[in-house]
Image (cartoon, rainbow, N blue to C red):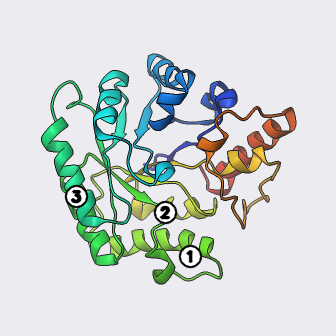
Amino acid sequence: MYTKIKVSHESPLQLMPKSRNYNDYDYALVHLFETHPAYYEFFKESLKLGREVLLDNSIFELGTAFDSTKFYNYVVDLQPSYYVVPDVLEDCKGTINSFQRWLGNHNFEPIKHIPKIGVIQGKTFEELVECYKFMSHYADYIAISFDYSYYQISALGGTKLERMCNGRIKLIDDFVKEGVWNYDKPHHLLGCSLPNEFKHYTEKFLYNSIRSIDTSNPVVAGLHNIRYIDGVGLVDKLSIKLCDLIDYLPTDVNETNVMYNVSQFRTINNL
């Protein structure tokens, strides 16, 4: 039986309590814990409410993973449902080494029981396969990013965003064709370029191995009063990260557009 993919849209502080109504789980960016205590408390409260919380190492937002020791301390204190082990952008060897160091330094109580998410990284198909096979063996949960530069040479599309969108679809398809894909491990899809990508993952051949996705796309667009096109979503994307809008105070119009977009996101992708 097919289980729908869990969705989470990062949102500004003002909308986060309401986000529990449109998010299946809560997605936390660790670097905001230090600057926004209320943000941190939101996720502690979510866990008390019995919600899943996925703690990310903020590498997309920072360019490099958040300080490993501080990150470990937050994992210990928060006790999230899952956490993303520090990785290195587009660096297969660096990411594997980082994961191994984490296992050597932090794979013990009081966090040993928390499932570890390993992000695959690399610049070529061979590197992505190597990293995937490593994570398939050592991680509890495998994550695949939306913006590898590899997509620009591996996929068709008239724009960079289209190649990103088609690139991840093709990468997953190639993993399946090559016998690399591990159906026994849950997978998380990090971010998105174009919001109609995810309808391609409800095919039966993937069954329940893609478990979750996160993207702030419908929220960022809504905050800028950009409404999704019915049945399509967006054909372009604002180059703004939600973390930079964390203190944004939405107007009633902003909020209406956000709610419309998150509803359309699910409709477009059969989620």
Type of amino acid at the residue the image marks with label 3 = Ile
Q: Position of residue 73 (x, y in %)?
A: 30, 28
Q: Residues within 10 Å of mark 1 (few under 14, many from 20)?
A: many
| Front residue of 254 and 166 | 254
Foreground residue among 242 and 261: 242
* Label 3 environment density (alpha carbons within 10 Å; few <14, some 14–19, many ≥20): many
Q: Residue at x 40, y 60 (%)?
A: 206
Return the residue nearer the eye: 24 or 142. 142
Label pair 3/2, CB-CB below 8 angstroms: no
| Residue bearing mark 3 | 96
Kind of element beneath mark 1: helix
Q: Is residue 143 left or right of residue 167?
A: left
Q: Mark 2 — residue?
A: 203
In this rendering, the count of numbered labels is: 3
- Mark sitting earlier along the chain (1/2): 1
Dot placed on the residue nearer the N-terminal end, 1 or 3: 3
Residue identifier under label 1: 163
Spatial CA distance of label 1 from label 2 is 21 Å
Work out whether residue 136 can be spotted.
no
Q: Quadrant of residue 24?
A: top right
The residue type indicated by label 2 comes to: Glu
3 or 2: tag closer to the N-terminus? 3
Q: Is residue 57 visible?
A: yes
Q: CA distance from mark 3 to mark 2?
A: 30 Å
CA gap, disc 1 and disc 3: 26 Å
| Spot occupied by residue 254 in the image (x, y as percentages of width and height) | 81, 39
Nearer the viewer's eye, disc 1 or disc 2?
Answer: 1
Q: In the current view of this chain or complex, which residue is farthest to the right?
A: 253
Image height check: is 33 above or below 102? above
Q: Residues within 10 Å of mark 2 (few under 14, many from 20)?
A: few
